[in-house]
C-alpha cells in the first residue's frame, strides 16, 4: 500500500487495498498518540471517522480534504476514542454507530452493533467482529472486499492493547481472529505506539531480521514526521510478538518450552510488556 504525505507532517493519505470500490483514507495523529482515521467512499461521497479521539483534529482533517462526514464508527467506549463525538456530530450530523456492549458510555449513539452485524459507508460494507480483551465492549470493523480492518486498541503495529478488562486469554482469542486474514489485509489501529512496541519486540525476539528492519523503518519514519500506521497482516505475522505466540523463539523468550500453549505464551508476553 502506498502512502502519500499530506501538508500536515503527522498525516497520511492512502487508498484501501483490494477490489473496487477502493476507499480513500486519511490517517492522522490526535491528542498525543491516538490515530484518527477518515474513510471515504468515492462512489457516493459517504465518509466515516473511525472513533473521534479529538474533535479539532477530525474537523481539521475534514476541512483539509473537503470530505463530508456521514458516519462515525466507534471501536470501544474509552474516553480517548469517543471524547470528540458530541462536537463532531453537532458540526456534521454524522450517524454514530457503537458497540452494543458499551451501553450508554458512548455519547450520541444512533445504532448499536454486535458480532456479525453489517455496517455500510456508502457502497462500502463491513462486518462487526466482537474483539474483547482490551475492554469487554471492543469491536473491530472488517471490510472484507477492500481487505481493510479497523482494529482500534486490539491490534497495533508491532503490538496489542493492554488487557484492561477480563483475562489475557480473551485478548489472545480476539487477536487469533486476525491470523487467517490475507497477508495483504491493511490494519488501522487506534494508537501510534510503534517505537515502544519495536523495542519490546526486539527484546523478546532479537534474532528476528524482519523485526530489526521494521524497527529501523519506524525510526526513520518518526524522524520524517510519519508513523507506521497502517500495517498489514503479513507484516504483523512476521514481526509482531503477540501474533507470534506459536513460534518457538517467543516461547523460549518467556522461559517456556517450544510447543507450549500459545495463550499461555501470549499471557507471559503481555505481562512482560506491562513491566517493560
Image: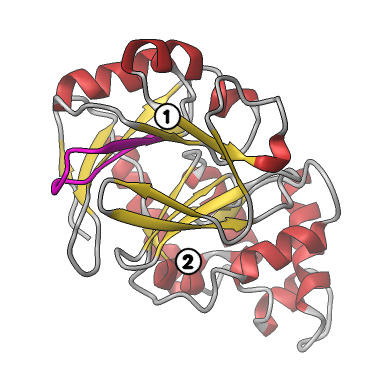
Q: Quarter of the image containing the N terminus?
A: bottom left
| Label 1 crowd bin: few (<14), some (14–19), many (20+), radius 10 Å | some
Residue extending farthest to the bottom is 259
What is the x, y in percent for residue 238? Answer: 47, 74
**Is disc 2 placed on a helix, strand or loop?**
helix
**Is disc 1 placed on a helix, strand or loop?**
strand
- Res 103 → quadrant: top right
What is the x, y in percent for residue 239? Answer: 49, 68
- State yes or no: residue 101 in magenta: no
Identified at 32% across, 17% down, the residue is 92
Nearer the observer, 158 or 47:
47
Residue at mark 2: 236
What is the x, y in percent for residue 33? Answer: 48, 30
- State yes or no: residue 46 in magenta: yes
Identified at 52% across, 79% down, the residue is 180
Q: Earlier in the sequence, mark 2 or mark 1?
A: 1
Asked if residue 255 can be seen in this view, the reply is: yes
Q: Nearer the viewer, mark 2 or mark 1?
A: 1
What is the x, y in percent for residue 201? Answer: 58, 59
Compared to residue 20, the image places residue 86 above or below, namely: above
Residue at mark 1: 95
Asked if residue 229 can be seen in this view, the reply is: no
Q: Which residues are magenta?
A: 36-49
Identified at 85% across, 50% down, the residue is 166
Nearer the observer, 267 or 109:
109
| Label 2 crowd bin: few (<14), some (14–19), many (20+), radius 10 Å | many
Amino acid at each position: 500500500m502506498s502512502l502519500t504525505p499530506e501538508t500536515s507532517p503527522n498525516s497520511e493519505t492512502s487508498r484501501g487495498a483490494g477490489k473496487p470500490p477502493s476507499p480513500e483514507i486519511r490517517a492522522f495523529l490526535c491528542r498525543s498518540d491516538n490515530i484518527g482515521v477518515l474513510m471515504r467512499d468515492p462512489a457516493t461521497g459517504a465518509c466515516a471517522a473511525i472513533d473521534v479521539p479529538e474533535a479539532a483534529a477530525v474537523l481539521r482533517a475534514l476541512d483539509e480534504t473537503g470530505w463530508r462526514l456521514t458516519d462515525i464508527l466507534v471501536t470501544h467506549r474509552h474516553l480517548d476514542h469517543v471524547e470528540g463525538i458530541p462536537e463532531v456530530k453537532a458540526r456534521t450530523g454524522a450517524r454514530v454507530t457503537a458497540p452494543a456492549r458499551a451501553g450508554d458510555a458512548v455519547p450520541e449513539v444512533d445504532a448499536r452493533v454486535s458480532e456479525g452485524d453489517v455496517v455500510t459507508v456508502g457502497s462500502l460494507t463491513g462486518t462487526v467482529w466482537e474483539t474483547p480483551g482490551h475492554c469487554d465492549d471492543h469491536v473491530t470493523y472488517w471490510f472484507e472486499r477492500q481487505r481493510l480492518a479497523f482494529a482500534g486498541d486490539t491490534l497495533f503495529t508491532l503490538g496489542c492493547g493492554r488487557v484492561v478488562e477480563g483475562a489475557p486469554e480473551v485478548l489472545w482469542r480476539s487477536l487469533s481472529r486476525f491470523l487467517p486474514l490475507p497477508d495483504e489485509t491493511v490494519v488501522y489501529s487506534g494508537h501510534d505506539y510503534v517505537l515502544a512496541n519495536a523495542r519490546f519486540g526486539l527484546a523478546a525476539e532479537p534474532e528476528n531480521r524482519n523485526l530489526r528492519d521494521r524497527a529501523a523503518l519506524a525510526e526513520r519514519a518518526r524522524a520524517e514526521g510519519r508513523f507506521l500506521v497502517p500495517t498489514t497482516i503479513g507484516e504483523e505475522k512476521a514481526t509482531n510478538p503477540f501474533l507470534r505466540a506459536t513460534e518457538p523463539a517467543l516461547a523460549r523468550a518467556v522461559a517456556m518450552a517450544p510447543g507450549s500453549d500459545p495463550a499461555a505464551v501470549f499471557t507471559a508476553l503481555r505481562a512482560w510488556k506491562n513491566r517493560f
